[in-house]
Amino acid sequence: MKSSDLSERPEAIGTLTDLNTLPGLNVSEATAINDSGVVVGYSANFFGYPNPLQNVSAFLMNGGHLYDLPGMAEAHGINSWDLTVGFTGSALGAIYPNSINDNGDVVGQLYEVSGGHAGVLYNGQSSLQDLNTIVADPTWSLQNATGINNSGQICGSGLHNGLQFRGFLITPVFHPYFLAQPAKAISGK
């Protein structure tokens, strides 16, 4: 089917909603949605390269209304309690949260001062944990954790065997309390 031949398109099975942008900005990206349909993301001004995004601001869309989230540049996760995670600015040594589950467990990426990256977990009960220390598999370098569900499964991306950029899924061995368990309680297969 040619993209220009609309007569061959299948019948619509849903509706598409343009979330628009925050006032004064010209692009937006929706990054997460919770079970209630509340959407978070960010708006910015796009000026092309080499400095494509400027004036970046996080938003929350609820009930057809777009709200600015002051103090946050990008929102990347929202749970069913409408708790939102995101970041402001960018600097080495910073942590960028990507996702939050209903237990308040947050995963994201640590930009190390040395220039490296590590996928991280914070469960509110202990210090920030590097996923590479939780899953003892020397063939992986877990660089970014992008999602965590209410069962404690964590997905993300990293280097496998030192050169293959791959997605990963960590599934807890002891469900759902693995976050309070010792590091040996998690399987990285």
Image (cartoon, rainbow, N blue to C red):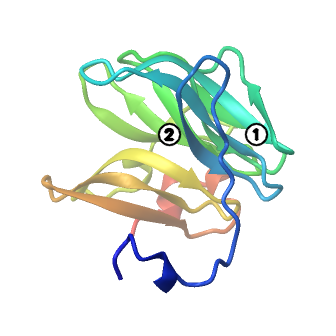
Tell me if 60 is positioned left or right of 132 in this view. right
The residue lying at 46 percent from left, 47 percent from top is 145
Would you say residue 48 is visible in this rendering? yes
The residue lying at 70 percent from left, 51 percent from top is 101
Residue nearer the viewer, 186 or 78: 78
Q: Where is residue 85 in the image (x, y as percent from the top left)?
A: 65, 34
The residue lying at 31 percent from left, 24 percent from top is 48
Depicted 86 relative to depicted 54: above or below: below
Tell me if 127 is positioned left or right of 117 in this view. right
Tell me if 120 is positioned left or right of 91 in this view. right
In the rendered structure, which disc, 2 or 1, sits on the residue that comes first in sequence? 1
Depicted 160 relative to depicted 111: above or below: below
Q: Identify the mark at residue 108; answer none if there is no mark.
A: 2
The quarter of the image holding the N terminus is: bottom left
Q: Where is residue 69 in the image (x, y as percent from the top left)?
A: 72, 23
Q: Mark 1 points at which residue?
A: 61
Would you say residue 127 is visible in this rendering? no
Depicted 78 relative to depicted 150: above or below: above
Label 1 neighbourhood size at 10 Å, few (<14), some (14-19), many (20+)? some
